[in-house]
Amino acid sequence: MPPTAPPVPSTLPPPGATAVLVLADGSVFWGRGLGASRRTVGEVCFNTSMTGYQEILTDPSYAGQIITFTFPHIGNVGTNPEDIETVVPAARGLVLRADVTEPSNWRATRHLDAWLKQHELPGISGIDTRRVTRRIRDLGPPTGVLAHDPDGRFDIPALVEEARAWPGLEGMDLAIDVTCRQTYQWDETRYVFGEGYGRQENPRHHVVAIDYGAKRNILRSLASQGCRVTVVPATATAEDVMRHQPDGVFLSNGPGDPAATGAYAVPTLKTLIDTGLPIFGICLGHQMLALALGGETRKMEIGHRGANHPVKALDSGRVEITSQNHGFCVVSETLPEGVEVSHVSLFDGTNQGIRVKDRPIFSVQYHPEASPGPQDSQYLFQRFVRMMDEKRG
């Protein structure tokens, strides 16, 4: 029996309601507002991570999305200026089960509510997040409008129409919105407890990273492996990349439909593939590489977002616990001869990695820099460096 949309709740706000989440199918979820007092529209997704909410909210891959956190204790460790992946969050808003409590962590410098207001991000708490998650699981990620008004004034029919009018992520190029505007250098290394972030002062290799929405910790991971990193915009041409005389090319994570971003990114990558340089891609970078090699991507019925996703490396049989955030995937059956699947999801069997057999080129769908394992996937950065070592001879 096919799943059906949930019944539409009453559109009359209950006492004390200062925020509402309205879906395109007419579903209405009342709650208490937090963060910025404003309205936002986007694709409603869910994330199952138990930690790292500040990194999640600042991950550029969440552009265009309203994040439902399945873990109830969001905000309990506050916020700080170090645990961010980009300066300006790209997410549209957040949905929580419990009210945000006072922070209890020695690194906290600010309450989550104040941090959200600073970044103009609206949120809603007091929501049955299990119900929202089941709705996404059964019917796919819906378009929704999250509205926060301290006076509790909402035009529900207008909000429903706004949700229905939003075009959705399929066919949408969001990398162009979150990429850097100009080339810059990166040398900050990964966080060391008691010491903070360091600097790479003796790099062995020069990597050009194409920024489709790069997370800072990916760049830190490259720097920690002995790389001097030059970051270029998503629209950089092959000539722009090669002008820097790199030892290797990195393709970053990012948001949106890979086919839309591929309109300008794929021609660049095809030329870079022909140079013979080592190439390593993550997330959207993985999907861009697959398209450039002749494969296809598709929108997933249920995206992968969380820090508990098991992935199997086919060459070793080893299982990695990974962090993921994607709503599109590479279709393994479309990969051409000479390109093989290297990793698969143990949740649904979808593609999680590819490797070119006769060239130093590989990519993964998940986020090895996030380290939920905690160090299960750091070997991928080491593999990239070994490829550059071998290329140099």
Image: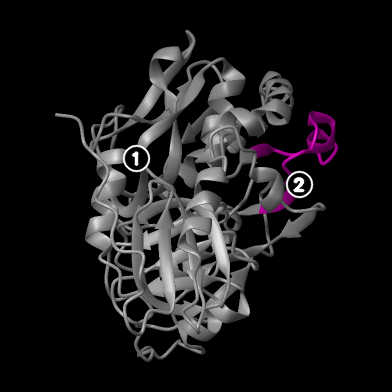
Label 2 element class: strand
Identify the magenta region.
228-249
Q: Label 2 amino acid?
A: Val
**Residue at the spot of label 1:** 140
Of 215 and 93, nearer the camera is 93
Query: Between disc 1 and disc 2, whose residue precedes?
Result: 1
* Residue at 41% across, 91% down: 106
- Residue 31: percent from the left, percent from the top? 35, 74
Residue 266 x %, y %? 67, 25
Q: Residue furthest top?
A: 337
> Is disc 1 surrounded by few (<14), some (14 to 19) or many (20+) residues within 10 Å?
some
Dot 2 corresponds to which residue? 232
Q: Quadrant of the N terminus?
A: top left
Whether residue 36 is visible: yes
Crowdedness near tag 2: few (<14), some (14–19) or many (≥20) residues, C-alpha within 10 Å: many
Residue 151 lies, in percent from the top left, at 50, 84
Picture quarter containing residue 53? Answer: bottom left
